[in-house]
């Protein structure tokens, strides 16, 4: 089974802090994604990466950046956290063949 | 980016009842996917649909890919308490394997 591991289940940070959300997958997938999940809005794509050091903006990249130095790890960075970035963040890894995403368990981030 | 219109937003049903939810869009999709998210977890794929008109079952779940390629529905028969969760539809746009759109989710509550 594919395993997508997010390093933290819950995080509480203060406004202005730099925040790192880490995600690791163990199936050598090339494509990895970061989404945020908000009630009534579903999942919205922040950034995705299709290879090491390659990244593309999703629908809501403002206030975020990403890093993909190794194939198995995809990091989401909040340069200066703000209260409107309080959300559930989901990392996903994309399997080859039929279009499927495998999700991590999510990180619930609260910015105070 | 455009999200899918998923309805209903929430459902409260009695154990044993059947459930139906659907997604629509003004755009065409190549693939429709249905995910379930248990509390505190990431979404897990339930059913994937690849052809217009396709009807696929997975146990008590049945999903269909609309013939216009702009809609899909998911039915759950004889609901049980462990069906509780949030159900998401997702559609993959043509020509871009990374362009996956999600519905806002249907929160299902099953009363024993």
Image: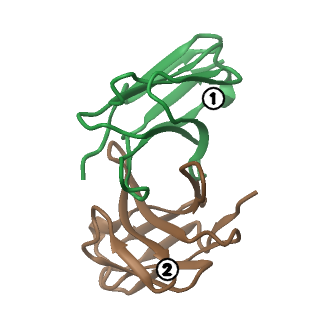
Chain colours: A brown, B green
Give residue A54's mark.
Answer: none
Picture layout, residue B20 above or below residue A104? above
Residue picked out by circle 2: A75
Q: Residue at (70%, 71%) from the top-left corner?
A: A26
- Indicate the position of residue B10 as horizontal and vertical percent values: 42, 28
Residue A45 found in image quarter? bottom left
Q: Residue at (41%, 40%) from the top-left corner?
A: B30
Q: Which residue in the rendered view is the most extreme toward the top?
A: B17
Q: Secondary structure at mark 2?
A: strand
Q: Nearer the viewer, residue B110 or A42?
A: A42
Position of residue B31 in the picture relative to residue A3 (left or right): left
Q: Nearer the viewer, residue B109 or A69?
A: A69
Q: Residue at (54%, 27%) from the top-left corner?
A: B109
Picture layout, residue B43 above or below residue B112? below
Residue picked out by circle 1: B83
Image quarter hosting the C terminus of chain B: top right
Mark 2 crowd level (few <14, some 14–19, many ≥20, 10 Å Cα): some
Q: Residue at (43%, 42%) from the top-left corner?
A: B90
- Indicate the position of residue B43 as horizontal and vertical percent values: 56, 48
Mark 1 crowd level (few <14, some 14–19, many ≥20, 10 Å Cα): some
Q: Which residue in the rendered view is the most extreme toward the right?
A: A1
Position of residue A50 in the picture relative to residue B48 (left or right): left
């Amino acid at each position: 089974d594919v395993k997508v591991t997010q390093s933290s289940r819950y995080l509480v940070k203060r406004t202005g802090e730099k925040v790192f959300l880490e995600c690791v997958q163990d199936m050598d997938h090339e494509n990895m994604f970061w989404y945020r999940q908000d009630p009534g809005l579903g999942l919205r794509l922040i950034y995705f990466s299709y290879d090491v050091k390659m990244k593309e903006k999703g629908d809501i990249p403002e206030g975020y950046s990403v890093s993909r130095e190794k194939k198995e790890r995809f990091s989401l960075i909040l340069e200066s956290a703000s209260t409107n970035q309080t959300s559930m963040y989901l990392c996903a890894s994309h399997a080859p063949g039929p279009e499927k995403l495998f999700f991590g368990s999510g990180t619930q981030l609260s910015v105070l | 980016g455009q999200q899918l219109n998923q309805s209903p937003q929430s459902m409260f049903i009695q154990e044993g009842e059947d459930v139906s939810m659907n997604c629509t869009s003004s755009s065409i999709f190549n693939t429709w996917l249905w995910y379930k998210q248990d509390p505190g977890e990431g979404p897990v794929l339930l059913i994937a649909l690849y052809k217009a008109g396709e009807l696929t079952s997975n146990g008590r779940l049945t999903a269909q890919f609309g013939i216009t390629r702009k809609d899909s529905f998911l039915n759950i028969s004889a609901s049980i308490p462990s069906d509780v969760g949030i159900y998401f539809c997702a559609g993959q746009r043509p020509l871009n394997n990374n362009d996956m759109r999600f519905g806002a989710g249907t929160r299902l509550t099953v009363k024993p």
